[in-house]
Image (tube, rainbow, N blue to C red):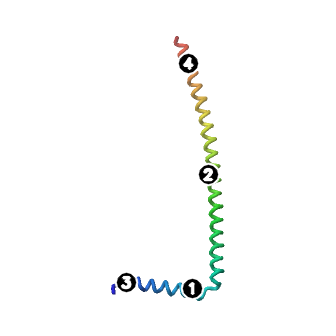
Amino acid sequence: MKNSEKIIGALVLGAIIGAAAGVLFAPNKGSETRKKIVDDAKGLAGDLKQRVKSTVDNLRERADSLQQMAESKLEEYKEQGKQKAEEFKARTNNLS
């Protein structure tokens, strides 16, 4: 046998022994352990859901803020454009 085959065999055997020991020495019945795992998973899902909701809310606020800023800048640039057009029109009328 090659060394790598021995190592893989030892790892597999160790995993089997570990799983058997875990079942034999588990502090709770299997049904209780499964319930705990499900409850923990639900708790994690709830936490994740809350974090996603919070992130989405923050992104919405930032998007609204950026939209307001963009609209404000657009109005500012429109007013500047109107002023420049009026100044240009006044200069061209003076030339005639």
Who is closer to the viewer here, 67 or 10? 10
| SS of the residue under disc 1 | helix
Identify the disc placed on residue 22: 1
Asked which secondary structure carries label 2, the reply is helix
Mark 1 vs mark 4: in front: 1
**Residue type, label 3:** Glu
Amino acid tagged 2: Leu
Q: Secondary structure at mark 4?
A: helix
- Where residue 13 is drawn, which disc sits there? none
Q: Is residue 95 above or below residue 59?
A: above
Q: Quadrant of residue 37?
A: bottom right
Instruction: Single out the mark in the foreground, 3 or 2.
Output: 3
Residue 36 occupies which quadrant of the picture? bottom right
What is the crowding at mark 3: few (fewer than 14 residues within 10 Å), some, or many (at least 20)?
A: few
Q: Amino acid at mark 1?
A: Gly
**68 in relation to 18, above or below:** above
Q: Residues within 10 Å of mark 1 (few under 14, many from 20)?
A: few
Amino acid type, callout 4 = Lys
Mark 4 or 3, closer to the camera: 3
Q: Residue at x 58, y 29 (%)?
A: 80
Pick the quarter of the image with the N terminus. bottom left
Above or below residue 67? Residue 45 is below
Name the residue that disc number 4 marks: 89
Which residue in the structure is indicated by mark 2?
59
Distance from the alpha carbon under mark 4 to that under mark 3: 89 Å
Q: Nearer the viewer, mark 4 or mark 2?
A: 2
Return the disc, 4 or 2, that comes first in the chain's sequence: 2
Disc with the residue nearer the chain's start (4 vs 3): 3
